[in-house]
Image (spheres, rainbow, N blue to C red):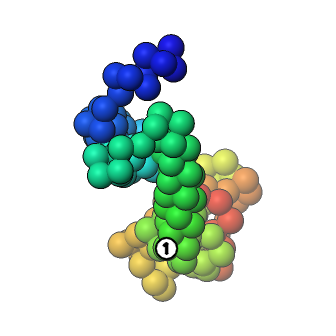
Amino acid sequence: MLDFLANTLLWWHWIIFGLILLILEIFTGTFIMLGLGIGATIVGVADLILILSLNKELLTWSIISIITITLLFKYFKNNSPKDKSGQSDYAIGIKGIVEEPIDANGRGKVKFNIPILGNTIWHATAKEDIPILTKVKIVNVKG
């Protein structure tokens, strides 16, 4: 099998394989296929210039893919948002005042001094009765 591949695998096969992997990345979003695709495309270009053996092609592809995937993960890990603004749980700990009484296991309304996801008044639930004008704090977010 390896003899067959060594004799028939050409530089443009690597580039096509790399492009297919890059297209598959669109459907996965994991950056794994992106790293593998970049590695395969680079091997295709290198094979065009240097005419590598199959063993060197596979070794080069493995090394470049591992380096690329590692760099992608490090880059996107370091560039992830530092604050949770816009995420549902970023508001945990924010204090507000009850505007509409909250019945035990029921629903009421709470007003906040700062907008949370664009609104200052939100529906709230509680495990116990909470009267109007009571100061409350967000401890959990659902939805």
Q: Residue 80: in sight, yes or no?
A: no
Question: Looking at the picture, does residue 64 appear above or below residue 131?
Answer: above
Instruction: Decide which of 118, 32 is in the foreground and name it.
Output: 32
Instruction: Decide which of 128, 137 is in the foreground and name it.
Output: 137
Q: Residue at x 48, y 85 (%)?
A: 113
Residue 110 coordinates in the image, percent (x, y): 52, 70
Residue 103 coordinates in the image, percent (x, y): 64, 55
Q: Residue at x 35, y 27 (%)?
A: 9
Q: Quadrant of residue 73?
A: bottom right
Q: Residue at x 65, y 60 (%)?
A: 140
| Label 1 Cα neighbours within 10 Å, binned few <14 / some 14-19 / many ≥20 | few
Left or right: 10 as drawn, with respect to 88: left
Is label 1 in a helix, a strand or a loop? loop
In this rendering, the count of numbered labels is: 1
Callout 1 amino acid: Asn
Q: Residue at x 54, y 77 (%)?
A: 82
Residue 17 coordinates in the image, percent (x, y): 33, 34
Question: Looking at the picture, does residue 67 appear above or below residue 81?
Answer: above
Question: Looking at the picture, does residue 87 appear above or below residue 143?
Answer: below
Point out the residue furthest to the bottom here: 113
Residue 85 coordinates in the image, percent (x, y): 47, 73
Point out the residue furthest to the right here: 128
Q: Quadrant of residue 13?
A: top left
Q: Residue 46: in sight, yes or no?
A: yes
Q: Quadrant of residue 47?
A: top left
From the image, tell me which residue sits under label 1. 79
